[in-house]
Amino acid sequence: MSDYWLADADARVLGPISFEVLKDLAASGKLAEVRAVSRDGRSFSPVANFPEVLGALGPRLPEAVRAEQQAAIQRLRQWLGEIKNQPAQDVFRVPESSTPDTYRAAFFALVKRFYPDRLSPEATVELRRACEDVFLALTQKILEVERRRVPQGPPPIGKSEVSQISWRGGSVDVRLKVKAHDVRFFTWHPEINFRFDALYVETSEFAVPGTPVNLSIDFEGAPETMTAWGRVIRSDNEKPANLPKGLGIKLLDLPESDRSFIRTWIARASSRT
Amino acid sequence: MGQPVVLIVEDNQLSRTMLRDALRDVPCAVSEAHDGDEAFAALTSSPPAVMLLDLVLPKRSGSEVLKFVKEKKLPTRVLIITAMDTRGMADQALDDGAHGFIGKPFHPLEVRSAVEGALAAHAAGGT
């Protein structure tokens, strides 16, 4: 029999799965918390009794490191609860009357400790999630500060646009030019927005849901074009009445660094409105 | 005739809430199971039209629940919703009779669209 059942620390069970699928999941980093294994789905033994499974999972963290990370998660969750209702100046530890640049400097000094891509490769999924939650909470705080700013300088010129849309085989190539002050693609649809890794682009093209989309996004002033891929999740026949015809696109496999970049871009643009 | 039932089998409360929200405009009645045993009980007493099934569950796994549906030839259409979204896992689930496979994090529209398709297939009696 070639099947395996895997149990995690909360006694949640996955299986039966073949050893090939097990290796596939392990290689994707999705089996970090396996604690027990069964070959019949009924009697489970510690994962240490299954050398082939241990081999597929790769080196395990020493208990001391694991305990340290668990303690860090608890501290982060507690701190998150504390800062939830604190004003930004208390969270960033600056005088309330500080300039926006002072707030930003304090924000970046604080947030870089929690940026998910900066965590060590040994960080568990739970620790990564906790850090991401802190990252989002701090981003929300700096956004509150930016919203209080009085707009300065000349009004922004131009708007974000779809600069190219073309079909290639069964997929669509879309190129966007995104202005610093205009993040409509990521925010203007009530459901298809970046909260769900999705965007809505204005076009008269129609594509059935599921159509692959290759995206190139030129952010104003950014040195490189961001590339991503996704699938159409809605076309124009179901658009809200106040939006132009367009395609709803869910981004897939978006790296955390790109997700973070777009979140920051949206936050900055929101602060200008 | 009452509305078709969609059973959410998911141990995480936040995910259950998000799935319920995703289905709020779909004409169906939503019920919940929190682990594999509850899913077996629900399937045995009254098979739903559609089941949204997590693969990693307390007590009995989602794969075992899926195999039960196949072995008993239940009319329930099963949509897998899981973070274990590798090609191998998806192929195995589809081979075991799943109607669809959605990776986490999911978009509400993906869920809604998939459930509407599964409900239509259930009503037509097809696959």
Image (spheres, coloured by chain):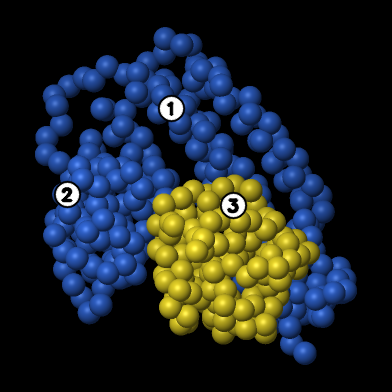
Chain colours: A blue, B yellow
Q: Using the image as rendered, state which of residue B106 and residue A125 is in the foreground.
A: B106
What whole-number distance in Å separates the C-alpha atoms at marks 3 and 1?
A: 31 Å
* Residue at image location 79% in from the left, 47% down from the top: A67
Which residue extends farthest left?
A: A158
Give coordinates of residue A74: x percent, y percent: 72, 38
Residue bearing the label numbered 1: A142
Amino acid at pointer 1: Ile
Residue bearing the label numbered 3: B16
Q: Residues within 10 Å of mark 3 (few under 14, many from 20)?
A: some
Please report, as a chain letter, where disc 1 is located.
Answer: A
Amino acid at pointer 2: Pro
Q: Is residue A254 visible?
A: no
* Residue at image location 14% in from the left, 27% down from the top: A155
Is A178 left, or right, of A59 in this rendering?
Answer: left
Is A190 left, or right, of A49 in this rendering?
Answer: left
A81 over A152 or under it: above or below: below
Q: Residues within 10 Å of mark 2 (few under 14, many from 20)?
A: some
Q: Using the image as rendered, state which of residue A162 and residue B123 is in the foreground.
A: B123
Please report, as a chain letter, where disc 3 is located.
Answer: B
Mark 2–mark 3 CB contact (< 8 Å): no
What whole-number distance in Å separates the C-alpha atoms at marks 2 and 1?
A: 32 Å
Residue bearing the label numbered 2: A244
A134 over A99 or under it: above or below: below
